[in-house]
Image (cartoon, rainbow, N blue to C red):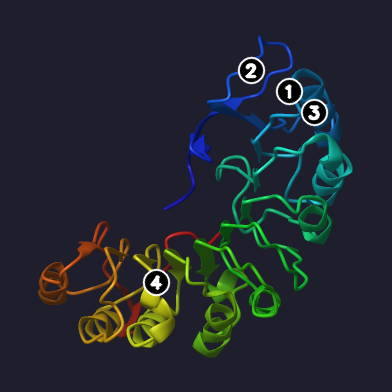
Amino acid sequence: MTISDSTTTFHNKKVVQYDPDSAFDPSPDVVYRLALDYDDERKMPELIDSFLARADKATLEALVIGMWGEPYEAGADAVIAALASRALELPALRALFVGDMTYEECEISWIVQGNYKPLLDAFPQLEELRIRGGNELTLEPFAHQHLRKFTIESGGLDQKIALALAASSMPNLEHLELWLGADDYGFSGDVALYRKVLAQLATPGLRYLGLRDAEIADDLAAWLASEPLLASVTTLDLSLGTIGDAGAEALLQGTQLGNLARLDLSHHYISPANQQKLKALPFEVVLDDPQEEDQYDGEGHRYVAVGE
């Protein structure tokens, strides 16, 4: 699987591509996506200035940032700085998505990200932050009182990001989504590390936990099946990863899944017999996109859905 389409909805609003030469839609039901082409002579800070000159800055709730020129070479720090410098003019901004790019624009593992401390400091009222790309992504431990949804999409998440999250605070968090990826594309870490992340970030209001696109999906399932911190979670999302029968059997024997309404295991390597058992669980189990192991030299090989 590759990311072949730009985001169409964000923060419960329709995403519209911003064109400085077209009519501007001031409707509160849309969120604008700002993106440059490879041959664009403008820089993203200029496009941000152009957009904010036309938008109602006092009521702007959400913004999507797409390709910022050559994102496989130039990182997002200039984008972050441009947004942070205008923070006082954007008192209503509640949601940001930085890195909305398809594989044709830039493969997820090639996206050079940046340091998000200036942005988190500048927008203490932010409720949703979504980041795509883990290459050179920097997070320092932070405390943020209002974040409810926090997402990092990566083809390979470095353990330093998980360590920073394990030392951070988001007391109102409802949705935690991390794409772990594969070690070929930068993943490092283990279940013990993500146990620390959950121990730090689990809140009474946490409803969605996504540890997606993980090559350690079987190990994650074995841990989470008996993790008391899942008590408040209604959606457990282990999709896009490499879960197989070992993980499925752990979930079938799980002691801490009683409050789940939905378990997403899409893109999986689970046998038909265990799929049938999972479907009999007393909550929705999503088993779309079944996979088969590739065989090389007598060994089976599994792959996450989104790597490069």
Q: Which is more N-terminal, label 1 or label 3? A: 3
Query: What residue sits right under mark 3 in the picture?
Result: 47
Which residue is at the front of the view, 247 or 71?
Answer: 247
Q: Secondary structure at mark 4?
A: helix
Closest to the camera, between mark 2 and mark 3, is 2
Q: Label 4, label 2: how many angstroms apart (C-alpha)? A: 38 Å
Closest to the camera, between mark 4 and mark 2, is 4
Q: Secondary structure at mark 2?
A: loop
Q: Which is more N-terminal, label 2 or label 1? A: 2
Amino acid, disc 1: Asp
Which residue is at the front of the view, 19 or 184?
Answer: 19
Closest to the camera, between mark 3 and mark 1, is 1
Which residue is at the front of the view, 241 or 151?
Answer: 151
The answer to whether mark 1 and mark 2 are in CB contact below 8 A is yes
Q: Which is more N-terminal, label 1 or label 4? A: 1
Q: Which is more N-terminal, label 3 or label 4? A: 3
Mark 3 packing: few (<14 Cα in 10 Å), some, or many (20+)?
some
Amino acid, disc 3: Leu
Q: Position of 63 compared to 69: left or right?
A: left
Query: What residue sits right under mark 1 in the picture?
Result: 56
Mark 4 packing: few (<14 Cα in 10 Å), some, or many (20+)?
many
Amino acid, disc 2: Pro
Query: What residue sits right under mark 2 in the picture?
Result: 26
Q: Secondary structure at mark 1?
A: loop
Query: What residue sits right under mark 4 in the picture?
Result: 232
Q: Is residue 47 above or below residue 202?
A: above
Which residue is pictured at 33% across the width and 75% down the height?
A: 243
Which disc number belongs to residue 247?
none
Q: Secondary structure at mark 3?
A: helix
